[in-house]
Image (cartoon, rainbow, N blue to C red):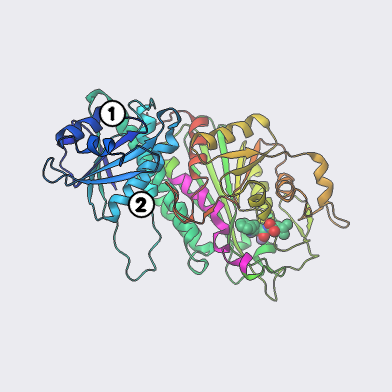
Amino acid sequence: MNIKVVAGDIAQQDADAVVVNLFEGVTTPGGATGAVDGAMGGAISALIADGEVRGKRGELTLIHTLGTIAPRRVLVAGLGKAESFTLDGVRSVAAESARRLNGIGVKSAATIVHGAGIGGLDGKAAAQALAEGMVMGLYRFDKYKSNASDVSLTDVSVVEFDGSKVDALQQGVDEGRIIGEAVNLCRDMANEPANNMTPSDMAERALAVGQKYGVGLEVLERARMAELGMGALLGVAQGSEEPPKFIIMRYNGDADDEANNIGLLGKGITFDSGGLDIKNAAGMSTMKGDMAGGASVIAAMQAIAQLKPRINVTAIVPATENMPSGTAQRPGDVVRAMNGKTIEIDNTDAEGRLVLADAMAYARTIGLSRIVDVATLTGAMAVALGDQCIGAFGNDDAFTGQVVDAANAVGERAWPLPMYDDYKSQYSSDIADIKNTGGRGAGSITGALIIGEFNDGAPWVHLDIAGTARARGSKGATVKGATGVPVRTLVRLVQDLGGVGIKN
Ligand code: BES
Ligand code: MN
Ligand code: ZN
């Protein structure tokens, strides 16, 4: 999608359709909406007077302009109450408007930046949310549909009356497009069926990102993982015919200060059958998406490489299937992770923490000083927080706070859960250092604590996205299927830590 910011009058644009907006309770539209209303002989105010257009959040009214202005259609988007309108609202309204116009075959649209006027939002931030919303809202995964049609809406002009604001808005739009495209990359990977998103396929997607945007890529094969002592990861992988891949991507944003770095680790289970502790049909049905954490860190790298923050970022994805077979690991087996700790396999379905154990230990050996891991780790997470909020677990309150703040700033939302040492006894083993499960109580917390056993002191946050990685329906910028959470959080965090960066 091409999105450009232009200075001018929204009523004078040469586009198939124009998008204006209305806050709830406004009876005489001003600004851009007023200009379009005036040019159409009061068509919008007449609808308001009749009570048909009320400015309610989610309300979309399509008006045929019948030659009064050049564009053939005007879409009036309700924004709800001005006091409660936020950047999330901008993203949602932009997504829903784009879907509506695309649905009627509109190819080009002119829009204003919602909320930057009487909404009081920062113009650049609102422009970013607008672009994110349009790019995310028009996402679809239809490559396997024989009758798929192209997205028609490809050209958007963001119209700003005040020419002095154009540059800032264009920056916001460009950033929003980059981030929205990264979200969609994550969605594409996590929506892909497991037969076409094997560990090798994941490595290839990472390679494509690396080549296009100049991010270094290294892929460790099984033999190298064995040399490094990654027994926990290899134990999970041994039941599958698909070779595991240990994917490492590296963005150098601060060559002068090697210690200014962060590691982003993502669970890359391309299919989680449960292993010999096999899942039932309902439990297995969405398990092609068990690599969503891995996809999110690869996708975040795509955006980071374009936004160029001043910080070094390494993404690590331990990728493998978790399958039952004659070579699969058994309940009761003991494996040794790269840091030397032994783990008794209590349940082969608790595999995410096993592959992340080795990813974490590896991350520490290459000097990553702050670490965020992202994983569809526990069904218990969806029970605790549902599908609207990421669970955050950390060993450093300040760093956890930064990650949670980033999530809340971008509207993905995260909430910290406690990491009391007392829970550690739940995963003690009679014969090994630990076992890989901690029982029913506090299942998400013990999962996080087990990953922490391999971290060894670096500030670290674990994001459990088991509840948030997949959406049951489309709403606002969310499209049914893989959500792309927490790509935007990761990008924002890295931007917060790295400042404006080397581009600016
Ligand atoms: N990938 C699952 C967790 C999951 C469940 C993600 C549902 C998304 C939706 C994970 O590997 C798993 O199976 N976890 C087990 C852990 C248990 C065996 C300790 C679980 O949550 O039941
Ligand atoms: Mn599992
Ligand atoms: Zn899993």
Whichever of callouts 1 and 2 sits on the residue coming sooner in the sequence is 2
Which quadrant contains ligand 1? bottom right
Mark 1, secondary structure of its residue: helix
Mark 2, secondary structure of its residue: loop
Q: Position of residue 464 (x, y in %)?
A: 62, 48
For the view shown, which residue lies furthest in the bottom direction? 326
Residue at mark 1 to residue at mark 2: CA–CA distance: 25 Å
483 w.r.t. 308: above or below: below
The range drawn in magenta is 282-302
Q: Position of residue 354 (x, y in %)?
A: 69, 55
Please tell me whether mark 1 or mark 2 is closer to you in this view: 2
Q: Quadrant of residue 12?
A: top left
What numbered label is drawn on residue 138? Answer: 2
For the view shown, which residue lies furthest in the right direction? 430
Instruction: Residue at 33% x, 51% y: name it.
Output: 99
Quadrant location of the C terminus? top left
Residue 503 seen by the camera:
no
40 w.r.t. 190: above or below: above
Residue 218 seen by the camera:
yes
Q: Categorize mark 2 by other alpha carbons within 10 Å: few (<14), some (14-19), many (20+).
A: many
Q: Nearer the viewer, residue 51 or 56?
A: 51
Q: Categorize mark 1 by other alpha carbons within 10 Å: few (<14), some (14-19), many (20+).
A: some
Left or right relative to 251: residue 240 = right
| Magenta segment main secondary structure | helix
Of the residues shown, which amino acid type is indicated by label 2? Leu
Magenta span includes 287: yes
Q: Nearer the viewer, residue 499 or 250?
A: 499
Q: Quadrant of residue 319?
A: bottom right
Q: Position of residue 91 (x, y in %)?
A: 40, 40
What residue is pinned by disc 1?
A: 167
Of the residues shown, which amino acid type is indicated by label 1? Asp
